[in-house]
Amino acid sequence: MKTLIKLKIEKFEEQGQEYFVATSDELQGLVAEGETVEKVIEIAEDVARTLLELEQENKFKDFAIHFGFDLAYYHFTA
């Protein structure tokens, strides 16, 4: 399943070096930096994937704790 997330990409320049920063209002914690637009998008995809996996894992943990499951016997993968 693919999730579409709008990115805000900004261009910065420091000491003659260009770089790009991507953030998203739709996914808290998503911040990526790269030397090109393509690279910052690639990094942002990896960061988003990780954040979404962690979000799903935390939802599972909350569910398990609420219903009294012993998490030592359950392994969750996204």
Image (spheres, rainbow, N blue to C red):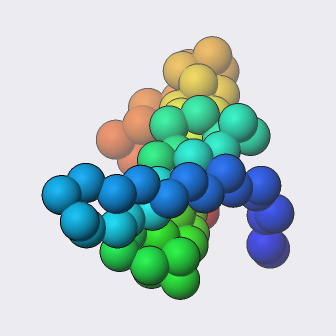
The picture places residue 37, in percent across and down from the top left corner, at 53, 76
Q: Is residue 3 left or right of residue 16?
A: right
Q: Is residue 2 left or right of residue 76?
A: right
Image quadrant occupied by the C terminus: bottom right
Which residue occupies the foreground of this view, 35 or 13? 13
Above or below: residue 60 compared with residue 11: above
Image quadrant occupied by the N terminus: bottom right
The image shows a total of numbered marks equal to 0
Classify residue 59 by image quadrant: top right
Q: Is residue 32 left or right of residue 67?
A: left
Which residue occupies the foreground of this view, 77 or 24? 24
Residue 37 showing in the rendered view: yes
**Residue name at image x 76 percent, y 56 percent:** 5
**Residue name at image x 44 percent, y 32 percent:** 70
Classify residue 25 by image quadrant: top right
- In the current view of this chain or complex, which residue is farthest to the left? 15
The picture places residue 63, in percent across and down from the top left corner, at 65, 28
**Residue name at image x 23 percent, y 65 percent:** 16
Which residue occupies the foreground of this view, 20 or 24? 20
**Residue name at image x 59 percent, y 24 percent:** 62
Residue 57 showing in the rendered view: no
The picture places residue 6, in percent across and down from the top left corner, at 77, 55
Q: Is residue 65 left or right of residue 72?
A: right
